[in-house]
Image: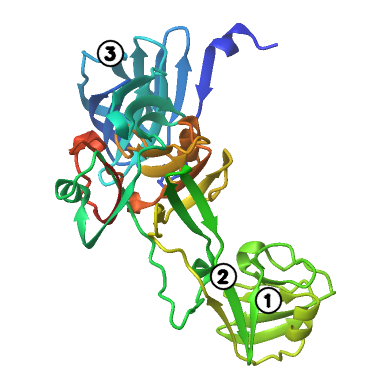
Amino acid sequence: MINKLKRNLIIACCIAVMGWSAADAAVLTNMRSVEGTGQTRIVLDLDGAPTGWSSVYNENTNVLKITLPNTTNKSTISFNKKSVLIKDVGVSSAGKNIVVSIEGKQPIQKNIFALANPDRLVIDVYTNIEQKTTTSLGSSGQLLKWSKSGDNGRLRIYKAFVPSTAKMTVLHSNTPQTLTNLANSHGGTIFFGVETPIVKPLTNGKSLVSDTNDLEASNALRYTYSNGYSINTVEPSLVAALGKEDLHINGVNQTRLANSLILYTPAFGESTNTNTYGHEVVIKNRKVVRVGEGNSKINAGEFVLSGHGTVGKELAKIKVGDSANIYRTAGIAKISVKDAVVYSGGDEVLRKGAYVGPKTATSRGARNYIGVTSAGNLILLSIDGHSAESVGVTAQEGAVLLREAGAINGLEVTNKGHNDMIVNKKVITQDGKDSGAEYTDAIVIP
């Protein structure tokens, strides 16, 4: 049974191995604090980096103690006594270590991390306070400003809800411009900066596939008067040119069925995991380098074509050294005819409420999302990052917030780490400051 002491004393040790030498003593030279909504950031300025740190939080007294080993104190404390979260901050020595004590006025949480050039330790102290402010945008929808706590600190989120009756337009500029300049020169209530992916042009109806990026599915946000907003994912149409034969490829990195031709890449695994009732050719640098009947190994830089039935018999004619090319033969038009408007771009992260984005996108920062609800409404979500007010999110954390905002399907718009949203000619993200990023495209709600 957990005793009272263990229940009321939460110990979180973060002994970080950061390549610092234990022989190098650090000196605390200054301490300062910055206030934010529901958060206080305390910065310890250091001469030399500490060998790590450990932290202990007492739930009974709301006191957080952070121990920096092999560190001395020569600091001048500059603490904002008007902090709504922190009652007091102090530094004491304990042998070769120093202890920073932070007393909260209420229960607090923390996120601690080190920065270099110059060396400093950052302590974000925050609460679970959640604030939401909603503003009506008339027929264009409504704007929600949302401040909440995440697992690693405070988050500042902006959500534009657009009803299915409000038709978007896709604004395109031949010259890259800041979103502020685009908004000032065009009419509209909401401007959401987006990055349009570069798609290889088709020559004579096809383009050569040079790497796995050319095999990725195309994602599109579509609007129609009859159904409102929807997100569609379209797999590329591919053909394999082997000698004089052009063979239609039925799929990429999926199970090979009867009389089908499947293209495998290293993303599928170490081998195709197919049986011997077919035929396979391995392609590298537009040449066939190996042939076999099944379960071919997939090395870096290689494609494997695996055919069954009639298609397998065609592959059996191919020899090592023969030329082999993969072509993409179709794409998505940006703007369709009649009543539909389409924005093509973004990476799929949410499908039927489940996260389907990359598992490796773990960096935390500013991110932007486009989502649709089951009723055909549109959600534009922008999350600030890299500040005391908002630490940012990973791709999956942002997708979870998009789902929490009401979306069932969603895309992340990369925007190279920037997030810009303008409502009624005013920048609402990043403390009301335009990021300076330049866009050729924007989603506009009149």
Q: Name the residue beneath numbered marker 3.
A: 84
Q: In which quarter of the image is the C terminus?
A: top left
**Neighbour tally class for label 1: few under 14, some 14-19, many 20 plus, Cα within 10 Å:** many
Q: Name the residue beneath numbered marker 2.
A: 237
Instruction: Say which amino acid is labelled 2.
Output: Ser
Rendered position, 39 above or below 427: above
Q: In which quarter of the image is the N terminus?
A: top right
Rendered position, 113 above or below 308: above
Residue depicted at x 46% and y 83%: 204
Rendered position, 178 above or below 243: above
Instruction: Say which amino acid is labelled 1.
Output: Leu
- If you read the primary sequence from the N terminus, does the residue marked by circle 1 or circle 3 appear first? 3
Q: How far apart are marks 3 and 2 (CA)?
A: 58 Å
**Neighbour tally class for label 2: few under 14, some 14-19, many 20 plus, Cα within 10 Å:** some
In the picture, residue 125 is in which quadrant? top left
Relative placement, left or right, of 272 versus 329 is: right
Circle 2: element type: loop
**Neighbour tally class for label 3: few under 14, some 14-19, many 20 plus, Cα within 10 Å:** some
Q: Name the residue beneath numbered marker 1.
A: 305
Asked if the residue under mark 1 is in contact with the one under mark 2, i.e. CB atoms within 8 Å, the reply is no
In this rendered view, identify the residue nearer to me: 40 or 351. 351
Relative placement, left or right, of 202 versus 323 is: left
- Residue 39 in sight from this viewpoint: no
Q: Distance between the residues labelled 1 and 3?
A: 63 Å
In this rendered view, identify the residue nearer to me: 439 or 391. 439
In this rendered view, identify the residue nearer to me: 282 or 63. 282
Rendered position, 131 above or below 328: above
The figure's colour scheme reads rainbow
Q: How far apart are marks 2 and 1 (CA)?
A: 15 Å
Q: Position of residue 60 (x, y in %)?
A: 47, 7
Q: Position of residue 50 (x, y in %)?
A: 37, 37
Circle 1: element type: strand
